Amino acid sequence: MRKFLTFLLLTACVCALVGCGGAVDSGVTVDYGDSALYTKADLDAAIAAIEAEFHTWEGCELHSLRYGSDEMCSAENLDWMNALEAANDNAEVFSQCLMFYSDFHSPKSGGGAWEADAEYRDWQWWLARSEGGAWKLMTWGY
């Protein structure tokens, strides 16, 4: 009986740890695409930064996130991220950037910039980082 209880407890712990392994909220569909530039862990770190901001949007419900593609990580877009950083009087120089699209639903009563009870599709999230650094959310919107 003692071995059985130990086994049951161990199984429950393993299941709990596996369930906590993802960076994405339950109910959010994620399309990682096919990146030759970034690992799943890189993309999950970017998603965590997006979700941290999204959670401040009271009453909004995130439905999906999808990686924009490696083509969005162009030298031109990297220059844009560095220009945004410089415009905010910050000195970090980025060497990588990426973009995610999201679909979400606005609050039933609207408010702020949101149309009431509406679906927003292809909302863009731009992030940048220095080599090996943390992703920084630079801008978001249509």
Image (cartoon, rainbow, N blue to C red):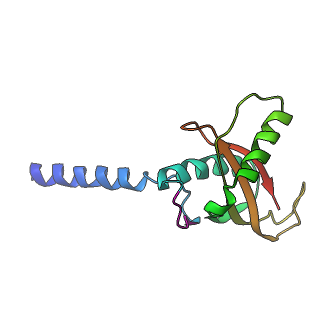
Residue at point 30% right, 49% down? Answer: 13
Location of residue 15 by image quarter: bottom left
Q: Horizontal and vertical percent for residue 75?
A: 71, 51
Q: In this picture, is 48 found above or below 63?
A: above
Give the residues drawn in magenta, as a range: 30-36
Q: Nearer the viewer, residue 86 or 31?
A: 86
* Quarter of image, res 66: bottom right
Residue 142 on image: x %, y %: 83, 62
Q: Is residue 5 left or right of residue 106?
A: left
Report whether 8 appears left or right of 108. Answer: left
* Left or right: 1, with 26 as reference point: left
Task: From the viewer's side, name the closer residue of 138 and 9.
Answer: 138
Is residue 57 shown in magenta? no
- Which one is nearer the viewer's eye here, 29 or 99? 99
Which residue lies at the image location 72% right of the left edge and 55% below the top edge?
125
- Residue 118, picture quadrant: bottom right
Q: What residue sits 52% from the left and 49% below the top?
A: 42
Vertical position of residue 134 compared to residue 17: above or below: above
- Up the image or down, 31 lies above or below 16; here it is below
Total tally of numbered discs in the picture: 0
- Residue 37 screen position, x and y as percent: 54, 55
From this view, report whether residue 91 is shown above or below residue 29: above
Secondary structure mostly seen in magenta is loop
Residue 107 location (% of width, % of height) = 80, 62
In this image, 87 relative to 127: left or right?
right
In the orientation shown, which residue stands out farthest toward the front?
Answer: 75
Of 98 and 5, nearer the camera is: 98
